[in-house]
Amino acid sequence: MTDIHFNKEKGSQLKLFTPGPVHVPERVLKEMAKPNDTHRSKPYSEMHQMVAEGLQKLLYTKNECLIFTSSATGIMEACVRNLVNDDEKALFFSIGAFGDRWYEIGVSNGKKSIKQGVEWGKAITSEVAQEALNNDKYSVVFIQANETSTGVYNPINELAPIIKESGVLLCVDATSSMAGVKIEVDKLGIDVCLASVQKCFAVPPGLAVCSVSTAAFEKAEQVKNRGLYFDLIDLKKRHVAKYQTPTTPPIPQIRALTAQLDYILNEEGLDKRFERHEQLAKHTRKWVNEINLEMFPEKGYESNTVSTIKNSLDIDIPKMVSMLLSKGYRIVNGYGQLANKTFRIGHMGEIQIKDLEKMLKVLSEIIDDLK
């Protein structure tokens, strides 16, 4: 088995095809190495504003876009604490491990939490959503756009209008799809759309972002015990007044995100970026078919950013991953209950088709040896 250790001198030399953190390009790493002013300075506020305005363009929204010093799970908890009163019910749609996590956050915060799940590998359909909404009265609905564990993409464009018609607030976890898949926040009426930056943004972890609607802010003002660190009202106050955060943020990551948003919006372009992610996914699915493996997600609901693949050839997945590591590439085993039953290939961020082809050629040879 390959034994990879911390490389003090050079850092990781692996080519990452993982669901996150992903490969960070050299130009982004160089941005992080630049000196910064303090988080209460004018230069910082100017940078913060650039991020906020860039996110609005990326998400097709006029909503305020906030910066969090946490992983996306922090914003998931913020949504629960800020938007659900103790006497209200919240509905959590779950299609995998991270949908379950959001439900567990609701329960651990003492909220009246209802989970509507489906078999892993399937998506929430319009029929499932409508039936769940008809069963009870809810104040907020929580749902993943892209479920990183199963490689399933929920049909958010179909689901959002149905959910919003019930009069609820809608929170969407777009952690492994934002900046890789088009999400039109205002058109869909999404009240909170969240993500962390170590996936499609291709920025090192430590930072999370979200858009928040006026309706969500107004609701938060009515909710008691929102907590301190993730108080949306305090975050908004600092953001609107000075383009700052209540506590010290990871300034190097924000500088990197500023550069990435500029690159995404003004060099690659949104349409080309979304198309590239779609082509990466199609290329991976084609390879899966050619090598006689099977996709785990239900056909038609496959993710464009991470492919979860069935172990239909009964391969020793840990050995396969280890052999691939020896060739300089990292993919990952299945997540949680899907470990050894599936494996996952991340194709998001700055990965190009030629990069994916090289890795898949090596992986094909390893799989042939293991059959």
Image (cartoon, grey):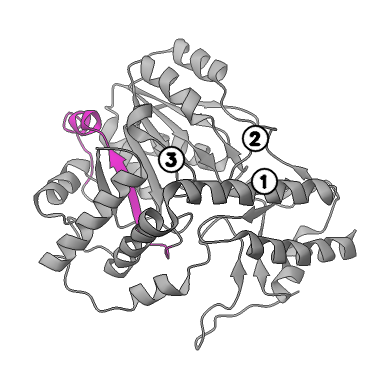
Task: Give me the residue at 25% from left, 31% from top.
Answer: 216
**Frontmost residue, 3 versus 320:** 320
Amino acid carrying label 3: it is Asp
Q: Amino acid at mark 1?
A: Lys
Q: Quadrant of the C terminus?
A: bottom right
Q: Report crowding for label 3: few under 14, some 14 to 19, many 20 or more residues within 10 A (C-alpha).
A: many
Question: How far is disc 2 from disc 3 in space, using C-alphas?
Answer: 17 Å
- Residue tagged 2: 120
Q: Residue 113's quadrant in the figure?
A: top left
Q: Is residue 204 magenta?
A: yes
Residue type at tag 2? Trp
The percent coordinates of residue 341 (x first, y second) are: 75, 47
Whichever of labels 3 and 1 marks the residue nearer the N terminus, that label is 3
Position of 269 relative to 87 (above/below):
below
Between discs 2 and 3, the one toward the N terminus: 2
Seen in the picture, residue 62 relative to 324 is either above or below; the reply is above
Residue 124 on image: x %, y %:
56, 26
Stretch in magenta: 203-227
The residue pinned by badge 3 equals 173
**Residue at numbered disc 1:** 282
Q: Secondary structure at mark 1?
A: helix
Residue 178 visible in the shown view? no
Q: Horizontal placement of 70 versus 351: left or right?
A: left
> Between tags 2 and 3, which lies in front?
3
| Viewer-nearest residue: 29 or 163 | 29
